[in-house]
């Protein structure tokens, strides 16, 4: 009898354990189903984005034909061009010493009459002053030997003008010299007869002058060499003593892959181009740039000659990509 009771109790215990296991498994399955449902619902709401589903969507944008037209998007091909480099050198406007006269009395004497003052225009052969010679006690004329402007007068009436003293300076300002300070390493980029663009310090004026000499001496103080250029100054807008900048263009000997400067945009502080993949789809290409001028930029990595890229309208594409990424729907702006 006792054996039967023990046997029945064991059976009941086994049945209880079995039922417990079944109920527990059912509860776990229900919990897993609820968690899965929550994940799906969150995903639909955009709260837990699936990286795999969105991978690459921030790399491109799709635009309608109307959007492409409104953005003014144009396509170009990477070309081979020479990239001419520009360099700037400090300089100073000086008198053209070939048209700059320093007037010295032929004989020492007393200044009797003065006809011209600083700033006055004079003609070649015009009388500047009269001096009474100490030797002959006769008056003689001080004559200008060129036409120009009186830039300096160093005498007064009744004053003694000694021998060798400069009493007038006359300058023809229609042409001037420009002295550019050039490091010896850069002097090879200059040659006689080449053009130099002259720019005022404030950037408001510019002119073209021509190199007339390269002085083969290194200044002891500045350690620079001097390149002299001739500047035409018919309107007298450039003044001796003024500081300027001289710009030269260094011509490249080789052609390199280039794109138009306006086509390059920056994403996360990195230069990029946009490349058309299909009729209305544009992809980002990260690039490495090299030399540049005012029009083109060299592409050293990212695209090769002949590849297509967006020249105009690249800023609009960038804006679409940024706003699409912020909205959580990158690549699907229309």
Image (cartoon, rainbow, N blue to C red):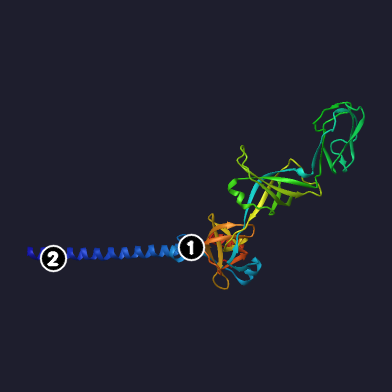
User: Is 178 placed left or right of 162 in the picture?
Assistant: left
Between 277 and 163, which is closer to the camera in this rendering? 163
Between 36 and 94, which is closer to the camera in this rendering? 94
Counting other residues with Cα less than 10 Å from the Cα at mark 1, is it few (<14), some (14-19), or many (20 or more)?
Answer: few
Residue marked by disc 2: 8
Residue marked by disc 1: 45
Between 190 and 305, which is closer to the camera in this rendering? 190
Outermost residue toward the front in this view: 136
Between 118 and 17, which is closer to the camera in this rendering? 118
Placement of 166 over or under 1, stated as above or below: above
Q: Which corner quadrant of the image does residue 17 belong to?
A: bottom left
Placement of 13 over or under 170, stated as above or below: below
In the rendered image, residue 252, in percent from the top left (x then y), is placed at: 60, 59
Residue placed at 69% from the left, 48% from the top?
213
Task: Provide the secondary structure element on which disc 2 rests.
Answer: helix
User: Is 36 placed left or right of 281 in the picture?
Assistant: left
Task: Provide the secondary structure element on which disc 1 rests.
Answer: helix
Residue placed at 14% from the left, 64% from the top?
10
User: Is 179 placed left or right of 284 in the picture?
Assistant: right
Outermost residue toward the bottom in this view: 279
């Amino acid at each position: 009898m006792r054996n039967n009771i023990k046997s029945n109790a064991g059976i009941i215990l086994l049945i209880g354990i079995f039922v417990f296991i079944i109920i527990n498994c059912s509860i776990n399955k229900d919990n897993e189903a609820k968690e899965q449902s929550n994940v799906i619902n969150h995903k639909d709401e955009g709260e837990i984005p699936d990286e795999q589903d969105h991978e690459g969507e921030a790399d491109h944008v799709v635009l309608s034909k109307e959007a492409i037209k409104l953005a003014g998007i144009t396509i170009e091909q990477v070309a081979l061009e020479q990239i001419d480099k520009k360099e700037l050198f400090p300089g100073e406007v000086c008198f053209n010493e070939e048209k700059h006269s320093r007037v010295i009395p032929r004989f020492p004497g007393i200044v009797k009459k003065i006809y011209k003052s600083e700033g006055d225009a004079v003609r070649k052969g015009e009388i500047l002053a009269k001096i009474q010679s100490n030797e002959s006690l006769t008056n003689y004329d001080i004559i200008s030997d060129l036409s120009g402007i009186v830039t300096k007068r160093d005498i007064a009436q009744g004053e003694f003008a000694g021998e060798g003293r400069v009493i007038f300076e006359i300058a023809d300002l229609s042409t001037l010299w420009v002295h550019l300070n050039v490091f010896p390493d850069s002097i090879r980029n200059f040659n006689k007869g080449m053009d130099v663009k002259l720019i005022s310090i404030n950037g408001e004026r510019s002119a073209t002058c021509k190199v007339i000499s390269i002085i083969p001496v290194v200044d002891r103080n500045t350690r620079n060499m001097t390149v002299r250029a001739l500047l035409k100054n018919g309107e007298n807008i450039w003044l001796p003593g003024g500081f300027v900048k001289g710009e030269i263009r260094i011509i490249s000997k080789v052609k390199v892959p280039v794109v138009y400067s306006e086509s390059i945009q920056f994403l996360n502080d990195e230069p990029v181009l946009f490349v058309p993949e299909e009729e209305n789809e544009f992809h980002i290409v990260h690039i490495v740039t090299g030399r540049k001028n005012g029009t083109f930029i060299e592409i050293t990595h990212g695209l090769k000659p002949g590849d297509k890229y967006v020249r105009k309208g690249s800023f609009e594409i960038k804006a679409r990509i940024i706003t699409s990424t912020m909205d959580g729907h990158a690549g699907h702006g229309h």
